Amino acid sequence: MLPIDSAIFLWLNASSTSPEWLLKLALFASQQLPGLMVAGTIGAFIVGDRDVRHRVLRVLLAMAMAWILARIGQHLVPMPRPFALGLGTQWISHGNSAGFPSTHASVAFAFGAAMAVNSKHGSFATAALLIAALIAWSRVCLGLHFPSDVLAGTAIGLICAQLSKLVVRSGLIPQIAH
């Protein structure tokens, strides 16, 4: 945890005086949006043509790599979550596992950045990055992560998006057949 983390966390963490719509948005972003993001990506792979499947493969690969790297990071750098230190309000139940880096932010930004790198449409890229930012923000708002947790997750996601592109281009993963 960075020294400024507590102050920024307490500023972003929802409290009993926060508007109801804000809490509902954060709950949706944290609990439903990640599943919709994954389902939509898999759906695009299933119904897409060869080019779409190839692009979606990079997105799925980036997401998988980000999840793995975030989980490894949590084991190597077991930083506590805010609620474990008695800070802020925790709005959803969560185990007292290590919080650094945020797996949600890692996977969300792997999705967003991989969509941005692999999409032919700027609107898809923008929407994907906004979804990633919303998911990352929600984890702090709901009291589950410090800002440094989601920033580290963001970095992991961005790196994995670039790595997935390189891995697919290198031929380590075979081209998708018709």
Image: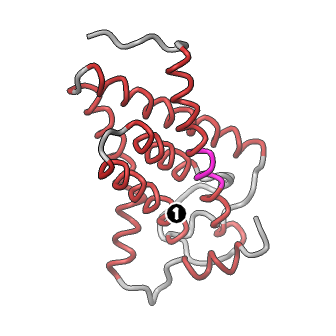
| Residue 153, magenta (yes or no) | yes
Circle 1 — which element? helix
Q: Residues within 10 Å of mark 1 (few under 14, many from 20)?
A: many
Majority secondary structure of magenta residues = helix
Q: Which residues are magenta?
A: 152-157
Q: Quadrant of the C terminus?
A: top left
Q: Quadrant of residue 26?
A: bottom left
Rendering coords of residue 24 (x, y %): 34, 71
Name the amino acid type tagged 1.
Arg
Rendering coords of residue 67 (x, y %): 56, 39
Rendering coords of residue 132 (x, y %): 45, 55
Task: Check disc 1 and report the residue beneath it.
Answer: 139
Q: Residue furthest left?
A: 47
| Residue 169, magenta (yes or no) | no
Q: Residue furthest bottom?
A: 17
Is residue 42 rendered to the left or right of residue 173? left
Q: Residue at x 77, y 68 (%)?
A: 2
Q: Quadrant of the N terminus?
A: bottom right
Is 36 drawn above or below residue 147 in the view shown? above
Rendering coords of residue 43 (x, y %): 26, 33
Is residue 128 rendered to the left or right of residue 105? left
Q: Residue at x 43, y 34 (%)?
A: 59
